Image: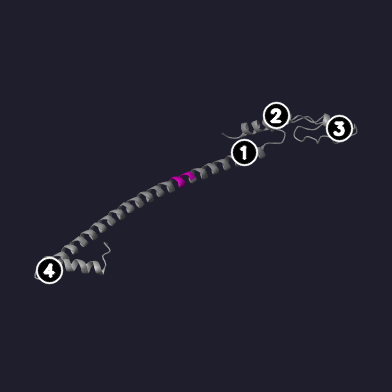
Amino acid sequence: MFDIGFWEMAFISVIALLIIGPERLPGVARTLGLWTGKARRMISDVKRDFKNELDQAELQNLKELKQDISSAASELKRTADDAAKEASDSGRDLKETLESVEAEPAGDSGKAQPPASSGDEASPEEPKPVGKKASGKSGHSASSKTPDKTDTKAADEDAERDLSNKAPA
């Protein structure tokens, strides 16, 4: 602790022998030893109490952490259960929608069927490629008869609207 070597101890012993005298030196050494022992015990008690307080504080932190983790785990489980229920409900709704669409007769779909077209016109659902010859005898190119993107987009929106009207809410 103080890093006192042999020569320092010898020097202190000689000074103590000269000042205290040979008759009282053993009693003073015994008293000094008792005080040193008490000081060491007090220091070790303080260290032990300090260590116990740190251990208790760490244990309290661990308990709080355990509570936080368990609450987060229960919240995660609740969220997962909600997501599973939502997925199940969505799957059931989708299945019901598919069953209702399959159960409808082909002519009663609620959507107006496009009129039958000649071979050189492209239908809105299946546009013909631009620049190629149209099938048929007229020889006209398909680029003049290809529907706009807005026509196809409007047809898609109509189809989605029809499906949403048929789906159970």
Magenta stretch contains residue 148: no
Nearer the observer, disc 3 or disc 2? Answer: 3
Q: Which of disc 2 and disc 3 is earlier in sequence? A: 3
Q: Splitting the image into 4 quarters, where does residue 162 fall?
A: top right
Q: Which of disc 3 and disc 4 is earlier in sequence? A: 4
Nearer the observer, disc 4 or disc 3? Answer: 4
Q: Which residue is mark 4?
A: 25
Label 4 to label 3: alpha-carbon separation: 127 Å
Scheme of image coloration: one colour
Crowd class of label 4 (few under 14; some 14 to 19; many from 20; radius 10 Å): some
User: Could you say where residue 13 lies in the image, as x and y percent from the top left?
Assistant: 18, 68
Tell me the amino acid under the disc marked 4: Leu
Q: Which residue is mark 3?
A: 141
Q: Give the answer, above or below, for where 79 lies relative to 52.
A: above
Q: Which of disc 3 and disc 1 is earlier in sequence? A: 1
**Quadrant containing the C terminus in the rendered view:** top right
Q: Which of disc 2 and disc 4 is earlier in sequence? A: 4
Q: Which residue is mark 1?
A: 97
Question: Mark 1–mark 4 contact, CB under 8 Å?
Answer: no
Question: Mark 2–mark 1 contact, CB under 8 Å?
Answer: no
In the image, 24 versus 164, the foreground residue is 24
Q: Which of disc 4 and disc 1 is earlier in sequence? A: 4
Label 1 to label 4: alpha-carbon separation: 106 Å
What span is in magenta?
75-79
Q: Which residue is mark 2?
A: 154
Tell me the amino acid under the disc marked 2: Ala
User: Could you say where residue 9 lies in the image, as x and y percent from the top left?
Assistant: 22, 67
User: Could you say where residue 77 lies in the image, as x and y percent from the top left?
Assistant: 46, 47
Q: Splitting the image into 4 quarters, where does residue 137 fall?
A: top right
Crowd class of label 3 (few under 14; some 14 to 19; many from 20; radius 10 Å): some
Tell me the amino acid under the disc marked 1: Thr
